[in-house]
Image: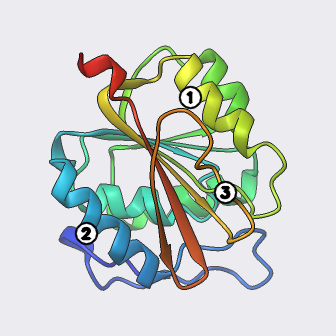
Amino acid sequence: MRIVGGKLKGIRLQVPKGFDSRPTTDFAKEGLFNLLSNEFDIDQCDVLDLCTGTGSLSLEFASRDAKSVIAVDWNTDCLKFISENCKKLKLTQIKLLKNDAIKFIQIAKVQFDIVVADPPYEYKHYEKLILSVFEKGILKPGAMLIVEHGKQNNFAHLPNFRDIRNYGGVHFSFFRNEDALL
């Protein structure tokens, strides 16, 4: 796993063998962050990373000086791995929380500029997660939800859907809180 941009660009982090999570590919991260950098000043963004896994996306946001990053996962090993990397890289803006993604959305008291969700590709609750983000109002006006998934998923029928991008085997569906801009 490599950090592809920002002040930590090029740093490689070794994911332990048998780790119960897959990092987002470097190719997919480069594509995603090229899109995001055209839409947002990342250094001004509050970011929520749901189902953070290896923390690959959280670390990218931190490397690009995101104002704050909340990384949520239910897996203690994942959170420990990210914590160790944050200490090693001296990243202080990442806050780690052990929780289920949907349960966290239900109790969240803050809003975010960017929410990313990268559950396992066989995750059964994608639609509930996406709908919950909008129902609970955790996106600021103009904010974006990005959901990473496999090719078997299609969310174009859901409200607030804007686009889908494919980077190899990685698919990102984009949703926007545009209603709040009116």
Indicate the quadrant where residue 44 lies. Answer: top left
User: Amino acid under label 2?
Assistant: Asn
Q: Secondary structure at mark 1?
A: helix
**In the image, is 46 to the left or to the right of 53?**
left
Work out whether residue 50 or residue 178 is closer to the camera in this orientation and state it. 178
Q: Mark 1 sits on what residue? A: 133
**Quadrant position of the C terminus in the picture:** top left
Indicate the quadrant where residue 140 lies. Answer: top left
Q: CA distance from mark 1 to mark 3?
A: 17 Å
**In the image, is 174 to the left or to the right of 142?**
right
Residue at image coords 74%, 51%: 76
Q: CA distance from mark 1 to mark 2?
A: 24 Å
Residue at image coords 25%, 40%: 45
Query: Mark 1 or 2 closer to N-term?
Result: 2
| Residue 99 visible | no
Q: Mark 2 sits on what residue? A: 34
Neighbour class for label 1 at 10 Å: few (<14), some, many (≥20)? some
Q: Secondary structure at mark 3?
A: loop
User: Amino acid under label 3?
Assistant: Asn
Q: Where residue 144 sits: x, y (%)?
A: 38, 40
Work out whether residue 168 or residue 119 is closer to the camera in this orientation and state it. 168
Q: Where residue 169 sits: x, y (%)?
A: 61, 81
Residue at image coords 54%, 85%: 168
Considering only vertical position in the picture, is 97 above or below 135? Answer: below
Neighbour class for label 3 at 10 Å: few (<14), some, many (≥20)? few
Q: Secondary structure at mark 2?
A: helix
Query: Mark 3 or 2 closer to N-term?
Result: 2
Q: Mark 3 sits on what residue? A: 154
In the image, farthest residue toward the front: 157
